[in-house]
Image (cartoon, rainbow, N blue to C red):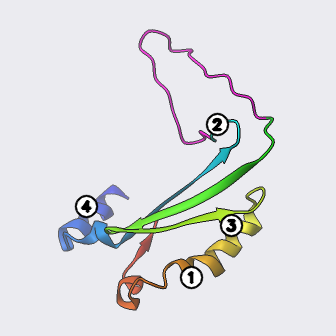
Amino acid sequence: MVAQFLTKIDEGPDFLTKILWTDESRFTNNGMINRHNSHYWSDSNPHWTKDVNFQVKWGVNVWCGILGDTLIGPYFFDGTLTGNKYRNFLNNEIPKLLENVSLEQRLKMYYH
């Protein structure tokens, strides 16, 4: 995978600008966010943990992307994010979010 990535960069230095870099996160009214992608390391205490309260009154899932120097989104999901909602997002919402991106750029784009 890394070798293919480096080959693509060698073939065209603008390769990284063709990747739609994306991520999503959940924000709640009590200030807690879903840290499923966060990792903590500690030299002084390798067993360090962070206690969180998952009982919240409301929350929102937010998706955002970056393509080259262009911000795509944000997109807000109603309710709990499920596989069906994400599939619907991929099929129906991303094309709307990419309307201001040229067709030529979309045809050369990689989704990450």
Q: Where is residue 44 shown, x and y percent of the image?
A: 44, 9
Q: Which residue is mark 2?
A: 31
**Amino acid type indicated by mark 1:** Lys
Is residue 96 or residue 47 the one in the foreground?
A: 96
Say whether disc 2 or disc 1 marks the residue closer to the N-terminus: 2
Q: Residues within 10 Å of mark 4 (few under 14, many from 20)?
A: few
Say whether disc 3 or disc 4 marks the residue closer to the N-terminus: 4
Q: Is residue 54 above or below residue 71?
A: above
Q: Residue at x 48, y 80 (%)?
A: 98
Between tags 3 and 4, which lies in front?
A: 3
Q: Is residue 16 left or right of residue 12?
A: right
Most extreme residue toward the top, as rendered? 44
**Amino acid type indicated by mark 2:** Gly
Q: Residue at x 70, y 75 (%)?
A: 88
Q: Residues within 10 Å of mark 2 (few under 14, many from 20)?
A: few
Q: Which residue is mark 3?
A: 86
Q: Which residue is mark 4?
A: 6
Say whether disc 4 or disc 1 marks the residue closer to the N-terminus: 4
Is residue 108 or residue 66 the one in the foreground?
A: 66
Q: Where is residue 59 shown, x and y percent of the image?
A: 72, 48
Q: Where is residue 7 shown, x and y percent of the image?
A: 24, 66
Q: Is 79 colored magenta in this rendering? A: no
Cα separation, mark 1 vs mark 3, equals: 15 Å
Q: Where is residue 56 shown, x and y percent of the image?
A: 78, 38
Q: Which residue is mark 1?
A: 96
Dominant SS in magenta: loop
Q: Is 41 colored magenta in this rendering? A: yes
Q: Secondary structure at mark 1?
A: helix
